[in-house]
Amino acid sequence: MRRAVILATVILLTACSSGGLGDISDIILGSPSTSQPSDVRGTIEYIDTGARRIDLNVSYINNLRDSQRGSIYYDDRTRVVYQNKEYRVTDLERGDQVEVRGANVSGRYVAETITVVRDVS
């Protein structure tokens, strides 16, 4: 029994350190449905323009309080809006508070619109 517990602990630690468990890019935010858009609200933690990914500290999903980290993805159709003006995704900054309207596309939460609620600068 003791060996089984030690083995399970080693496997769990190995998976966690390799990103196998808890990797934020594996979390699909919002609705898992591809036909139903959903809303996510949070604070930008990191922007990876190469992967076209934005990591968020999430505070709400579909108006339900939530506390997790997750990733949203963007494409050429994603709109960024702040004070009724259009911006580029590259204008976003770490610390900006955003509301995201998006949908599940091939297992990724892809943003249709990113609205900046509070600009960090």
Image (tube, rainbow, N blue to C red):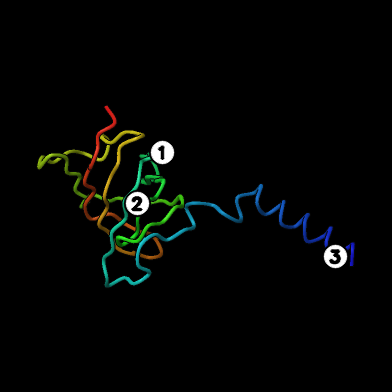
Cβ–Cβ below 8 Å for labels 1 and 3? no
Which of the marked residues, 1 or 3, is nearer the chain's N terminus? 3
Q: Quadrant of residue 21?
A: bottom right
The residue at which mark 2 appears reads as: 73
Q: Which of marks 2 and 3 is in front?
A: 3
Question: How far is disc 2 from disc 3 in space, using C-alphas?
Answer: 40 Å
The residue at which mark 1 appears reads as: 46
Name the image quarter holding the N terminus: bottom right
The x and y percentages for residue 62 are: 30, 62
The kind of secondary structure element at disc 1 is strand
Farthest top residue? 121
Name the kind of residue labelled 3 in the image.
Ala
The x and y percentages for residue 37 are: 26, 66
The residue at which mark 3 appears reads as: 4
Question: How far is disc 1 from disc 3 in space, using C-alphas?
Answer: 39 Å
Name the kind of residue labelled 1 in the image.
Tyr
Crowd tier of the residue under label 1, counting other residues whose Cα lies within 10 Å: few below 14, some 14–19, many 20 or above: some
The x and y percentages for residue 115 are: 21, 46
The kind of secondary structure element at disc 3 is helix
Name the kind of residue labelled 2 in the image.
Tyr
Q: Which mark is residue 112?
A: none
- Work out whether 34 lies above or below 81: below
Crowd tier of the residue under label 3, counting other residues whose Cα lies within 10 Å: few below 14, some 14–19, many 20 or above: few
Q: Position of 50 compared to 81: left or right?
A: right
- Work out whether 4 lies above or below 59: below
Q: Position of 11 compared to 113: left or right?
A: right
Farthest front residue? 65
